[in-house]
Each structure stands twice: as C-alpha cells, then as structure tokens.
Image (spheres, coloured by chain):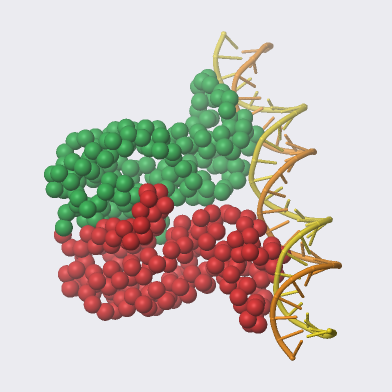
Chain colours: A red, B green, C yellow, D orange
Amino acid sequence: MTEIQASGSRARTRQSIVDAAIEVLARNPAAPLGEVAAAANVGRTTLHRYFAERADLTAALRAEAVDRLCQATERARIADGTGATAIRRLCQEYFDLGDVLSLIFNQQLLLTDADWQQAAEGDAAFGEMVERGHRDGTIDPELPATWIQSLIWSQLYAGWSYIGDQCVSRHEALRLILRSIEGAVSVR
Amino acid sequence: MTEIQASGSRARTRQSIVDAAIEVLARNPAAPLGEVAAAANVGRTTLHRYFAERADLTAALRAEAVDRLCQATERARIADGTGATAIRRLCQEYFDLGDVLSLIFNQQLLLTDADWQQAAEGDAAFGEMVERGHRDGTIDPELPATWIQSLIWSQLYAGWSYIGDQCVSRHEALRLILRSIEGAVSVR
DNA sequence: CTATTTTGGAACATCAGTGTTCCACTATGG
DNA sequence: CCATAGTGGAACACTGATGTTCCAAAATAG
C-alpha cells in the first residue's frame, strides 16, 4: 500500500519494474516475481522494496493499464466522424497497446466497471459512438455496443496471437483485424 | 502414464473426474487439484489414483478436447455447401463445446499441430473449405484460412464471455457470433 | 571526498500445492 | 454373506513461490 515517491532514480526503477511486469505477465500471468525482477534487471529484493506483495504490483499494473487505455482512447477521438471510422481509429490505437492488450484480455487483470468508465470516459462515450454509427448507417443496429466492445477486444487479441503463431508482420495483422472488424460491424 | 482400465465403475469415476476438470480448469487453469476432486465428488486420493500427476490429467483433458473437437467437426460436414454456410455450421457446432472452448483457447492446453490436424481431419479440410468459399464468392479472398480460424476461435470465446459478463441467453450470444463472423468473413 | 540513498545477494521462515503411503470404510457381484 | 474392487481421510515429505531481514557494495548527491 505504501507508495515510495519521487527522487528520479526511484521513479525510473519503479517504471522499469512495471514495464518488465507487463511484458512478462502478459506472456505468463502466473510467472514468479523473480522472473519479473530479472526482466527488469533488478534484484528480487528491490522489487519487493517497491511492491511489498504481489497484489501491490498487479494493482500498479492495473493503474498503468487504465492509464494507457485512457491515452489511447483520447488519441482515437471517438467522438469524431462516422461510427465506423471512429471504431477503426479506436482499434488502431488499441492495437498499439501490445502487451497491455494481452494483460487486460488474457488475464485476470480484471478491470472493474469503474476502470472501464475511466478508460473510455465512461461507457457513455463508447456507447455514444456506436449509437452514432447506428444512426448514420455505418454500424449494424442489430449489434449492441457491449457486444461490439467484446468483439474488438477478442479480435485484437486474436491479431496479436496471430503475429506469434503464424509469421506475420504487425502491419499485416492490423490490416486483417481492421478488415474483419469493419465487416463484422457494418450493415449488411 | 499407466492407464487403469474398464470395469464400469472405474470408467465412470474417470469420466466424472475429466468432466469436472474441464469445468473447473476452464474457469481457472491454475486451480488446485483438490478443487477438481471436490467438483467431481471424489477424494483427492482417488483423483491421484487415476491421474498420478497433474500432467497426466491435462494430457487426458487434451485427448478429450481433441475428441470432442473431432466429433463437432464431423457433425458440421464442412465439405458441404458454400464456404460461408460451412463456416456457419462449424461455428454452431464449436459453440456447443462450451467449457472445452475456453480450455483450448484461454489456456495453455496447447494443442499441437498434430492435434489440430486430427481435429479437422487435417488443416486440409479447413483450408479446403475456405478456398471453396474464396471461389464461390462467399468468403473474402483477402482473408487467409489461418486468420479465419483465429477469428472463429476468438469470437466464440468472446461470445461465451459475453454470456457471463452481460446477462444474455446462449441463443442470443450465438446469434451475435454468427452475425459478426458472417460479416467479417463475407466479401465486401 | 564524505554522507546518503539505493541496490542486490544470502539466508530464513512460511505457505500452498503436490504426490505418496497407509488404513479403514463402503459398495458390489459371486 | 463374504471376498474383493474401489474409495476417501489423515498424515507425511517435498517443492517452489513468497515475503522478510540483514548487511555489504555501488551509485548518487552534497
């Protein structure tokens, strides 16, 4: 619980640990903390100095994930343009989240409803985007906003896995994702 | 490794354990074996009698998963009809796999390539179905078979999660899945 | 160069899951 | 009803992850 603050050096070490944790835990949510420490080029002791318990680390990860999610959502300007183009931009931004994507999706990094609201400036913004799409005829009215959200996440995750499984460039994977989502979402 | 055989009673107990394991491990891949035993209404001792090590149990699960996957694939008759209708039937069948779905997707139940080939009578059958769709104009030629496979799995998984997260009937979830996949896959 | 901060290694107690053994208990079918 | 297959509880040793403490080395600031 107790957060150590500032001092430049501390902040850097802390961030290094968080970044390493994202990378390691994205691949294996049950990885021992020693692995995280190693990945961060830090002693296990040091890791525990910053995050006393495992729960403290995962809490920090959740905060970091929500933060990056917020930034991505803002960059996507989901209030602009047609519903479909907004979704397209959102997917592009989310795609760049990389490991954070896996963490959120794959794992029990269970974001609470409150987290989601914060991330998307409230489900309101996302729901509004979808409804706009329903009205302007670029999004299938049969598909509720919540489902489209599930859709986007699962597709993005599939895309990232695809890069690893098959031997495909990020760019190609993103192309497939966007094409598929557009098709899934658009009016028939 | 040593498999105990037959005798009616044994077979029943064994199956009960396997079924329980599917249910429990689908929700939490790291669940202790005691939980599996409890879910199977069986003592932990008995579980170990049938599956000496955890690895033995997961091996059995893999076999069971491959088996059910095979049956589902056969029922779908993916060699019949247009590419799109075949995919639709396949999705319907896979959807009914339920927890097995989560096990395969969510978890490191990593099916080997050999498993997949067995399950789909070789990637050949699946690839053939997709190519048929490319030719008959019901499947977007831009999307390779491997991607469509990723797509299907991720969507099915999303659908099952959706049932839990939102409060939606299986039927409604399946409807959304089929509609989305059809849209994602069809020619634009 | 000193004082302070920050670090990492080593050693330790603790804990939960695992896998084993042993024995007594229930069924079940001959 | 009796022999046997099947079960489950209790106890145990073992393992790997966790979290703590202590101290000496390294980095940084003054």
- Which quarter of the picture shows residue B41? top right
Residue B184 visible somewhere in the drawing: yes
In the picture as drawn, the residue positioned furthest to the left comes out as B136
Location of residue A82 with respect to B98 vertically, above or below: below
Q: Position of residue A6 (x, y in %)?
A: 63, 82
Location of residue A28 with respect to A53 vertically, above or below: above
User: Viewed as shown, does residue D8 lie left or right of B130?
Assistant: right
At 63% across and 72% down in the image, what residue appears? A13
Q: Position of residue B3 (x, y in %)?
A: 55, 25
- Which quarter of the picture shows residue A14? bottom right
At 61% across and 64% down in the image, what residue appears? A40
At 52% across and 61% down in the image, what residue appears? A23
Check the picture and name the quadrant holding the C terminus of chain B. Answer: bottom left
Q: Position of residue A123 (x, y in %)?
A: 37, 73
User: Viewed as shown, does residue B68 lie left or right of C21?
Assistant: left
Residue in the foreground of this view, choosing between A23 and B93: A23
Residue in the foreground of this view, choosing between A4 and B74: A4
Q: Position of residue A105 (x, y in %)?
A: 44, 60
